[in-house]
Amino acid sequence: MSKVGKIAYKPVGILLGVAAGAVAGFAFKEVWKIATGDDDAPNATDEERGWAEILAAAALQGAIFALVKAAVDRGGASGVRKLTGQWPD
């Protein structure tokens, strides 16, 4: 991809990243609710929750975020290729 194309993709990549974060946050809350029946996922500093629950929530949140981010990044790159004929770097 040309230097101009790379520069033009940067704002798109940033917007996609923000959107991915929002979608991942929503997805995590829904999955946590289904998996545990609890509306609120634990925070690391939540004194009422145990280590196992805190670490399980963090692992699940990280996995969902990584999955959504990869899907959004891949979709964005595919879209750029369709529009420009070149894959963004």
Image (tube, helix red, strand yellow):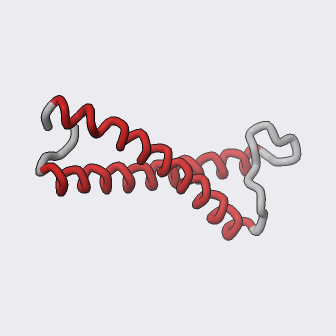
User: In the picture provided, is 44 more to the left or to the right than 14?
Assistant: right
60, 87: nearer the viewer = 87
Q: Residue furthest right?
A: 48
> Which image quadrant: the N terminus?
top left
Q: Position of residue 6 (x, y in %)?
A: 23, 34
Q: Position of residue 62 (x, y in %)?
A: 54, 47
> Which image quadrant: the C terminus?
top left
Compared to residue 3, the image places residue 64 above or below, namely below
- The residue shown at (73%, 65%) is 36
- The residue shown at (61%, 58%) is 26
Could you say which quadrant of the image residue 17 lies in? Answer: top left
20, 67: nearer the viewer = 20
Could you say which quadrant of the image residue 46 lies in? Answer: top right
User: In the picture provided, is 85 more to the left or to the right than 25?
Assistant: left
9, 28: nearer the viewer = 9
Q: Position of residue 9 (x, y in %)?
A: 28, 39
Could you say which quadrant of the image residue 10 lies in? Answer: top left
